Image (tube, grey):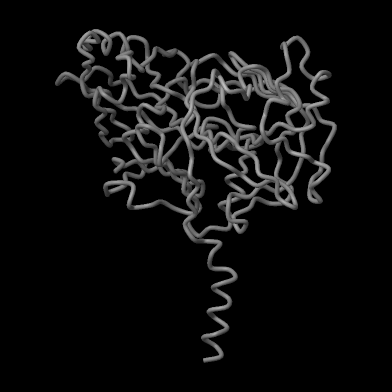
Amino acid sequence: MEFSANLLIFLALFGFVDALLRVPITRHKANRSRLLTATAGGWNEGLINENQIYYQGNVIVGTPGQTISIDFDTGSDLLWMSCNCARGSTLGGGHGTNYCNSHTHKFAPGASSTNQLTTNAYSVSYGSGYVNGLIMFDRVCLPGTAHCSASNQKMMCASFTDSSFQNSAGNPDSDGLMGLAYGQGNMANSAMKSIVAACTDKSFAFYMTNTGAGSELTICGKDPAHYVAPLHWLNIYQTSYYWTVALKQVVFGGAVKWSTVGAIILDTGTTGIYLPGTLVSKIQAACNLNACSCPTLTFNLNGVAFNLEGKYYLDSSCNLMVYASSETSAFAGYGSNWILGDAFMRKFYTVYDYVNAQVAIAPAR
């Protein structure tokens, strides 16, 4: 009995670390673009899409914890939040008005006993936005304090955020962004990778609804209630910075329309789908936008076929959410210019596994 009691105490203290953690997230738009290319001293963002879809939730930063509302983004790996806004005028340069103070929650480094704020400047340049600040180190936890990063997790104290990150009644937005990219080499900054290190199942998963209400991020595994089995596990390109799989074929209208192997990114921070221009032209020709009708697209990813009906890649105004990307730079830089974004993920449940370098996909329910 004493052994059993001690075991129960042990499980009560430590077992919850590996329990499936559910983080409610909300879906909203922001006038930003994707992270695609790196530059010295920070990131330079190539213009890929306006009116991005982002999935927002809360994290706890520092000791004692401070609640920060952030965007979860599989297309980048750095965690940053509004912080020390008074310094922004010295960091913004020619990037216009500083909206750092518009954010609802601003992190206070001096109030955290685990914070190490450096003097190393860092910037993120977007196609339609800009963020600048200083590198700092601290711990970040997801709701439920057992799920935390190391206390020296790299992040950015953002003292300058331009209008694309403005918080206002007309443009409600978050206080920062948490990158969930696969990362590799010296670009592996992901706080999520550090957080899931304590889990037996070192993965996270996204469930995204059509309206955004009820969307969910799970940590330490996946939720079978949100997908139709089986999960299809796909190896990623481990040399890629992103969660990138092989696009082998695209079929619609009863015929193969694309059969040149390329790399395609799964990205929660992109609204639509980006494909080679010649393929996009064929999709456009097959659609009847006046009738709000497009064919089912079948994506062959690593040899597995996934069917995406037209209703998923048409918006509420019957605009096509499939866009042309560069065919010549599909394997350029840290990954690909071909992207499966929100239009794909609203139908499919996706799981991201750091240890096995895989993603899993199954129809959502």
Residue 89, above or below 277 = below
Residue 289, above or below 342 = above
Report the number of discs.
0
Identify the residue shown where x is 58% and y is 45%. Answer: 192
Identify the residue shown where x is 73% and y is 18%. Answer: 98
Left of 94 or right of it: where is 359? Answer: left
Left of 164 or right of it: where is 209? Answer: left
Residue at the left extreme, as displayed: 254
Residue 35: quadrant of the picture: top right
Identify the residue shown where x is 44% and y is 37%. Answer: 236
Give the quarter of the figure containing the C terminus. top left
Q: Is residue 103 visible?
A: yes
Left of 363 or right of it: where is 215? Answer: right
Residue 263, above or below 144 = above
Front residue of 230 and 69:
69
**Residue 335 picture location, percent across and down:** 50, 26
Left of 161 or right of it: where is 268? Answer: left
**Residue 251 picture location, percent across and down:** 22, 23
Residue at the front extreme, as displayed: 169
Front residue of 136 and 314:
314
**Residue 211 picture location, percent across and down:** 37, 32
Q: Is residue 41 visible?
A: no
Identify the residue shown where x is 48% and y is 36%. Answer: 26
Residue 59: quadrant of the picture: top right
**Residue 328 picture location, percent across and down:** 45, 13
Residue at the bottom extreme, as displayed: 1
